[in-house]
Structures are given as structure tokens and as C-alpha cells.
Image (spheres, helix red, strand yellow):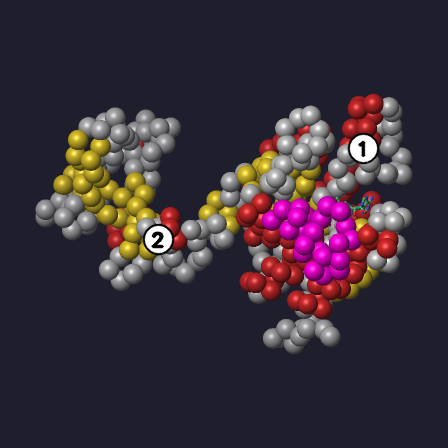
């Protein structure tokens, strides 16, 4: 049944699926119609790469031919991905050691080196791969690029990593905070490079009061590095005057004895009610985003163990957290439909209105595989089954389109 919004309109379904070769489907999408792309292309491990495109100049024997064929397959798809991305959009591509070096260069070419947001290590196999002579590989990569970095709306932080224990101090009225030096601790910033931020402050360590001008009982406080050399503050005079209540004057004991310094009270719950976010690092652990094992369990709970290496929804949810809650998401190597599942989970959790377009070809499942035995003749049949099951369980709706109808 269609959902009705408060204003009586029928919102777009959370999940849409198109069966087809993505190179046929992508050109039917309007330019700039997508905010976020996540894809997990075939990894070219030597046994999962069966493409019938015309790889001009890419075919050949040996490693060069193999990598060339893979990049020749990816290039026109990434060109299309760039075309359909909105100016503020971003793309994330999962990849493992086999093609990461080639993909990085290809994406630098297609999206521009300057638009790299990060090369993230994702610890999807915490036990490590025990086969082979080398080290036990326990990670893959995510390459993230902005369509246009200055205009990109991605916020490389997450509300989930914020730990209450990082804010150990309590005010009398129970607000949690931590103290951060108001002094800029980065040596690049000093009176020569940032002269307007080098000025004295006035503080009383007994009451904690800080001001930009002298007051009775105040001590003059200059910004200095630990070794006594002159430093600069992080806040300007107007900001200090406006937020004096968020500052604290204290006596500190350093290598050079006692001195008076000024600290910012950094609140767990900022006064403007915005949720606190933490900058995401470039290593994402399985305990944070899930693993291949947890991904298999998630899939099993919905449609059975019918796909070999799905991604965990936690990985895609973390990516979703970096973009607005109404993002239009696209996954054109959808596989078992993890991205669509993650979009429904994210909308359910935060009331968002994200939509997801999933595309997968009618690649036949292997005879004798779990999928074939469970009655799924193609991967597209698996994508479809999972996205339908997601809509039944979480709502949000599900529709299918055909490749020849322009969408977006
Ligand atoms: C590594 S899997 C994606 C797995 C997915 N992230 C998940 O969690 O289930 C890659 C998928 O791309 C699909 N695929 C490969 N070539 C394609 C193409 N040219 N067009 C559309 N789908 C394609 C394959 O059928 C496979 O399901």
C-alpha cells in the first residue's frame, strides 16, 4: 500500500530496482539526479569476472590484459556515474587488493585527484584470510570521491562514534563536557602566520571567568606553546566575547612549572540542540560496520544464504550517515541488495526520506549453488527478493522499472 505524507502526497518509494546491464541503465538516468553512489563491483579475482563487453584494447593474456580488461569495463560506468551525480554528490567504491591500485588511478582520472575524499580501509574479515603465502588479509578498501569537492555536501563525520566517556567532566547542572585548550596546539599557527589571533586574554582561575578585556581579580594570559614560545588562540575576540561562558580559566602544571591557561568547555550536547558528530577515521573496524560474516547472517535472515560475499548493511549505513537524510542513492552493482536494505534501515532509524535505485544484471546463478537450489535463476532475482522482503519488513515501498524507461 502506498504511504501518504502529511501533506497528502505520495512519497517516492524507498527502493526501486532495475534489472539490466548497468551500462544500458545508467544513460537513462538524468544528469545530476543522484546524490550518493555506492558500488561494489566484481573484484576481478580471476574467477568472478565474466564480462562480455567489448574491451577495446583491454583484452590480452597476463596481468596487464586482466587489469586492462577490468578498467575498460569500469571506465564507461564511472564516466556515467559522474554524469548522474549532483554537484554536491559523492561516490564510494568498494574494492580489494586485486584492483585497488588500478581503480585509484582510474578514479583520479574520471573524478579528478583533487576530489578524493579518502581511501578507507574496511576490516571486513577480522580473522584474516588464511589461504595463500602472504599475510592474512583482513581488509578491503573504499575509495571515496566528491563530484566537486568545494560543493560536496558530504560531512565526513558520524553521530554514532561519539562516546560519553570522551566527555568526563560535569557541570553542577549535569551537563557533560571536556576541556580543550583554547590555544591552537598546531605549530603551523603562530603569531607570524596568524597575527590576528595573538592577543592577551584575562582570566580568574578561582572563579574560572574569562574575558577579552581586564576585570577585577583577573590575570593576563598570553597564548604560549609548552616550550614557552608564543602561540595563538583558536577563537577571535568577537567569538570569545560571544561565548565567554564556554571558556574556563585554570591553573595548569607544565614542564616549566605552574601557569594560568584558558580552556574551551566542549559540550557533549551542544546548546543549539544539534547532535554531536565525530570525524570519521580512515580505518573502519568490523565491530563498527559489520563483517562479511554478519552480512551473510543479515541476508540469511531475509532470503537465505543465497549470495557469497554480500556487504554488511552497517558499512553502507555509515556511508549514508555522511550525507543528508533525503539523499537519492544509487547502487548499479547491487548484488543481493545491501544498499537498498541499508537505506530502509537508515530511514526507519532516523525518519529520513532517502531513496535508493538498485541496478543488477540478469547474471545467471551458478548451477548447484545455494541460490540456484533455492530457485533463484539470476542475481537480479535475488536483488528483487531481498528488496521486496525489506519493504515487507520495514515499509517504505518497493517498485520495479524496466531499463528502457528513463528514470530519475
Ligand atoms: C560484488 S557484487 C555486489 C554485492 C553487493 N554489494 C552486496 O552486498 O550484495 C557485484 C554485482 O554486480 C553485478 N554485475 C556485474 N556486472 C554487472 C553489470 N554490467 N551490470 C549490472 N550488474 C552487474 C553482479 O551480478 C554482482 O551481483
Of callouts 1 and 2, the N-terminal one: 1
Q: In the image, residue 206 lies at what x, y percent? A: 14, 48
Q: Is residue 179 left or right of residue 360?
A: left
- Identify the residue under disc 2: 267
Q: In the image, residue 289 lies at what x, y percent? A: 58, 48
The crowd level at tag 2 (other Cα within 10 Å; few <14, some 14-19, many 20+) is some
Tell me if residue 218 comes above or below residue 33 in the rendering: above
Point out which mark residue 46 bears: 1
Is residue 398 rendered magenta in the image?
A: no
Q: CA distance from mark 1 to mark 2?
A: 52 Å
Which residue is pictured at 78% across the width and 35% down the height? 44
Q: Which residues are magenta?
A: 290-311
Q: Quadrant of the C terminus?
A: bottom right
Q: In the depicted view, which residue is nearer to us: 322 or 65?
A: 65
Q: In the image, residue 53 lies at what x, y percent? A: 88, 38
Point out which mark residue 166 bears: none
Local secondary structure at mark 1: loop
Tell me if residue 234 comes above or below residue 362 in the rendering: above
Residue 298 shows in the view = yes
Which residue is pictured at 32% across the width and 29% down the height? 190
Which residue is pictured at 87% across the width and 28% down the height? 59
Which residue is pictured at 43% across the width and 53% down the height? 276
Q: In the image, residue 210 lies at what x, y percent? A: 21, 47
Q: Is residue 192 left or right of residue 343?
A: left
Q: In the depicted view, which residue is nearer to us: 219 or 392?
A: 392
Q: Is residue 406 left or right of residue 228?
A: right
Q: In the depicted view, which residue is nearer to us: 284 or 41?
A: 284
Amino acid at each position: 500500500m502506498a504511504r501518504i505524507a502529511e501533506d497528502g502526497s505520495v512519497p517516492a518509494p524507498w527502493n526501486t530496482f532495475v534489472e539490466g546491464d548497468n551500462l544500458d541503465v545508467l544513460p537513462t538516468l538524468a544528469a545530476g539526479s543522484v546524490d550518493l553512489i555506492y558500488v561494489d563491483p566484481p573484484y576481478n579475482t580471476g574467477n568472478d569476472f565474466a564480462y562480455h563487453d567489448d574491451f577495446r584494447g583491454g583484452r590480452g593474456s597476463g596481468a596487464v590484459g586482466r587489469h586492462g580488461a577490468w578498467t575498460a569495463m569500469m571506465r564507461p560506468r564511472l564516466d556515467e556515474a559522474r554524469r548522474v551525480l549532483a554537484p554536491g554528490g559523492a561516490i564510494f567504491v568498494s574494492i580489494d587488493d586485486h584492483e585497488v591500485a588500478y581503480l585509484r588511478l582510474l578514479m583520479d582520472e574520471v573524478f579528478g585527484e583533487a576530489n578524493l575524499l579518502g581511501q578507507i580501509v574496511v576490516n571486513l574479515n577480522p580473522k584474516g584470510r588464511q589461504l595463500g603465502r602472504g599475510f592474512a588479509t583482513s581488509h578491503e578498501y573504499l575509495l571515496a570521491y566528491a563530484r566537486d569537492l568545494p560543493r560536496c555536501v558530504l560531512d565526513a563525520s558520524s553521530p554514532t562514534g561519539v562516546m560519553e566517556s570522551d566527555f568526563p567532566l560535569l557541570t553542577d547542572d549535569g551537563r557533560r563536557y571536556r576541556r580543550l585548550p583554547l590555544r591552537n596546539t598546531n605549530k603551523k599557527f603562530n603569531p607570524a602566520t596568524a597575527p590576528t589571533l595573538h592577543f592577551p586574554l584575562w582570566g580568574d582561575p578561582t572563579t574560572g571567568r574569562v574575558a577579552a578585556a581586564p576585570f577585577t581579580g583577573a590575570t593576563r594570559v598570553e597564548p604560549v606553546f609548552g616550550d614557552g614560545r608564543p602561540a595563538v588562540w583558536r577563537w577571535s575576540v568577537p567569538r570569545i566575547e560571544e561565548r565567554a561562558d564556554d571558556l574556563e580559566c585554570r591553573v595548569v602544571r607544565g614542564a616549566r612549572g605552574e601557569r594560568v591557561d584558558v580552556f574551551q568547555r566542549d559540550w557533549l550536547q551542544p546548546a543549539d540542540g544539534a547532535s554531536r558528530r565525530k570525524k570519521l577515521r580512515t580505518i573502519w573496524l568490523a565491530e563498527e560496520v559489520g563483517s562479511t560474516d554478519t552480512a551473510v547472517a543479515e541476508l540469511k535472515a531475509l532470503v537465505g544464504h543465497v549470495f557469497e560475499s554480500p556487504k554488511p548493511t552497517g558499512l553502507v549505513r555509515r556511508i549514508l550517515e555522511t550525507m543528508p537524510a533525503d539523499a537519492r542513492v544509487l547502487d548499479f552493482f547491487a548484488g543481493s541488495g545491501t544498499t537498498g536494505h541499508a537505506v530502509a534501515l537508515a530511514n526507519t532509524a532516523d525518519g529520513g526520506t532517502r531513496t535508493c535505485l538498485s541496478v543488477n544484471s540478469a547474471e545467471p546463478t551458478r548451477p548447484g549453488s545455494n541460490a540456484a537450489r533455492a530457485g533463484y535463476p539470476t542475481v537480479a532475482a535475488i536483488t528483487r527478493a531481498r528488496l521486496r522482503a525489506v519493504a515487507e519488513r520495514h515499509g517504505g515501498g518497493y517498485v520495479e522499472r524496466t531499463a528502457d524507461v528513463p528514470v530519475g
